[in-house]
Amino acid sequence: MQILITDGRLRTFSLSMRAWQLALVIFSGLLSILLLSGTVYHFVFLKAVRDGWPVVSQVVQWVVRDEVAQRDRVMRDNLDALAQKIGEMQARMVHLEALEKRVFTLAGVAPEEIKALRAAPVASAPAGGSYAGMDTLTLSDLSGDLLKLDERAQQYTDLLALAESRMFESRLSGVMVPSSKPVEVSIGSGFGFRRDPFTGRPALHTGVDFSAPSGTQIQAAAAGVVLSTDWHPQYGRVLEIDHGQGLVTRYAHTQSFLVQAGAVVKRGQPIATIGNTGRSTGAHLHFEVLIDGVPQNPLRFLRQLPSDKHLATN
């Protein structure tokens, strides 16, 4: 592109520019106008507002006031929505408190434990759990209530953890008690005094007998740890399982062991097979339950078996 410039003396000058050079000149001009506009706004309009110039300051203040009002409306709407959510959460907390006693009673949690874990009471929301009609509601108010809700939620977390622990202890206690029959057959001889088959004299029978063919699998009466797998002159091949808290089950006269000492076993897991080893008159399992080494009547633990009164006739 070629530009001709003529001065007052009718002298002509020629200026040649390429397309990119012309574009650069136009861009520079627009940038200069923007910078000039920003400078004018900063030094003229803002000064007009601060110094109170007539007309100009009023126009600027009207624009700014409209923006502030719009921003306040948006913030108020957000605060109202947040307040509504907090009110709903607090109403749910009240409902949870109503369920609290029933759940903790079922879990076996004592009121003293609940009182010890619960912190100071958390301030509740206005009547009905609503902030409606509170013109002075601020973000600080909502933040405080959110913090209190978080503290209460933490309290419930701790309390529920305690309830879960109590329920687990109850379940674990049931798992560890030898309440399952080691062999699904009827009982031959019960716990108590009877005539010894070898000597003919009265002697204490310290367990119950389950008669079954040799090789029949024996199952653990409860979960535990295999304490030993040994040979005993009277019991023959005998296996013992430790169930904790001094409770041990003994399985005597077995033919073979299916687990080793130290193994962790589950309720109903095969642990040995019935045999006729040791001081025995035929293939059967002699089953004992001991607490701190003292023999107990296994029928006090086993489910759905005859009562002690019925055993006395055996």
Image: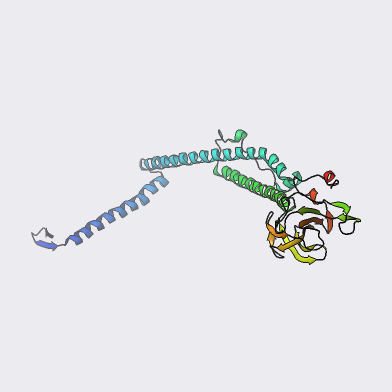
Determine whether 53 is above or below 13 in the image: above
Image quadrant assignment for residue 244:
bottom right
Instruction: Provide residue 218's location: percent of width, then percent of height.
Output: 71, 56
Q: Is residue 146 left or right of residue 274?
A: left
Instruction: Provide residue 84's location: percent of width, then percent of height.
Output: 54, 38
Q: Nearer the viewer, residue 177 or 135?
A: 177
Q: Residue furthest toward the left?
A: 10
Q: Residue furthest toward the right?
A: 201
Image quadrant assignment for residue 30:
bottom left
Q: Residue at x 20, y 61 (%)?
A: 20
Q: Nearer the viewer, residue 18 or 161?
A: 161
Q: Is residue 107 left or right of residue 192?
A: left
Image quadrant assignment for residue 274:
bottom right
Q: Is residue 20 left or right of residue 108?
A: left
Q: Nearer the viewer, residue 269 or 20?
A: 269
Q: Nearer the viewer, residue 309 or 64?
A: 309
Instruction: Provide residue 199's location: percent of width, then percent of height.
Output: 90, 59
Determine whether 68 is above or below 127 in the image: below
Q: Residue at x 52, y 38 (%)?
A: 80
Q: Residue at x 71, y 52 (%)?
A: 175
Identify the coloring. Answer: rainbow
Determine whether 236 is above or below 142 in the image: below
Q: Quadrant of the N terminus?
A: bottom left
Count up the numbered dots.
Answer: 0
Instruction: Provide residue 49's location: percent of width, then percent of height.
Output: 40, 45
